[in-house]
Amino acid sequence: MTTQQAFARYLIARKGLQPVTVNGYISSMRRFTRQLGERPTHAEAERFVEDLYLSNYSYSHKMNTVLALEQYLAFIGAPTRFGRQKKPRPIIKDTLTEGEVARLLYASRTIRQKAIVALLSYSGIRNFELCTLRVRNVLFTQNAVRIVCGKGLKDGVSEITPECTQILIEYLQAFPREPDDFLFTTLIRGNPLAMCDVRKIVRVLARTARVTKRVYPHLFRHSLTSNMLLRGADIISLRNQLRHTLLETTLHYANSIIFVERNRYQKFAPSYV
């Protein structure tokens, strides 16, 4: 058994982590062991974290790498805990307008592409939730999708429009599936989609549709939020759609979208002239 395989077994059997988390930690482990070797000293690990924190990598990349390193050090019998940088609260910008989402749907060359973009756009589900969604969890008569073991291992339901439901029906007519099958799979081998597959699909489609913004799967969740708020959605409805546990999470989401605040001002600003 390789060190990587043994680490994966440790994460699953000893720590009880979910496969999506284990895969992320294994990916991080491959990166830092190339630099540090398989048995880094505490001083080497600390210098690595220092350099990482001083780098321009995203906050999530830094934290995920540090968490993976802590788990790995515990695995090799040298447990330690590093400090945590304060999480930044950036303004969410460059979300997709309704027109840009429509262009992406129109530019889809296959019903499979169109179904993936429609589901991301209308439901706001996360990338890994789309990849693990099974046919039985599409509630066609209710215009909704049931998410099983989503973020934080929580189950929930996200609404979709009748138009989105119709696109999914047309997709399943072209790509028949059994109820227990994954809704989306790779075309050749029929394996479940990986998150990198979805990122590639939407990136290529954005070029085809000539959308100049950086398009990635989670942007559709941000865009659904901003477009619903611009249409006047209340914060409770938005929280239910996004399946946030805390209302504060949804409030931060709403307050960090720059165009929503601008739209609210234009709506309520007094008229002096």
Image (cartoon, rainbow, N blue to C red):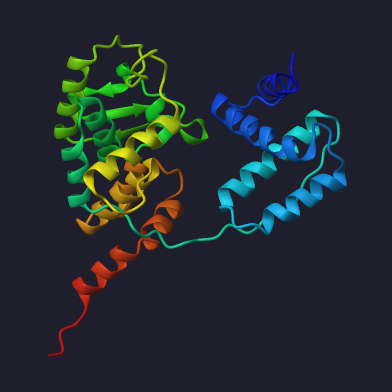
Instruction: Name above or below for residue 223 compared with residue 23.
Output: below
Residue 123 in sight here:
yes
| Image coords of residue 213 (percent x, y) | 32, 54
Please name the residue shown 36% across and 58% down the image: 254
Residue at the spot 19% in from the left edge and 71% down from the top edge: 267
Q: How many marks?
A: 0
Most extreme residue toward the bottom is: 273
Give whichever of 251, 74 is nearer the camera: 74
User: For the view shown, which residue lies furthest in the left direction?
Assistant: 273
Q: Residue at image x 40%, y 61%?
A: 256
**Quadrant in which the N terminus is drawn:** top right
Q: Position of residue 109 (x, y in %)?
A: 20, 31
- The answer to which of 144 and 207 lies nearer the viewer is 207
For residue 229, which quarter of the picture? bottom left
- The percent coordinates of residue 51 (x first, y second) are 72, 54
* Quadrant in the rendering for residue 132: top left
Quarter the C terminus occupies: bottom left
Relative side of 269 to 86, left or right: left
Residue 193, compared with residue 57, is above or below; it is above
Please give left or right for residue 23 compared with residue 1 in the image: left
Coordinates of residue 18 in the picture (x, y in percent):
57, 26
The single residue placed furthest to the top in the displayed view is: 178
Give the camera-side residue of 270 and 183: 183
Q: Can see residue 84? A: no
User: Which of 207/115 is in front?
Assistant: 207
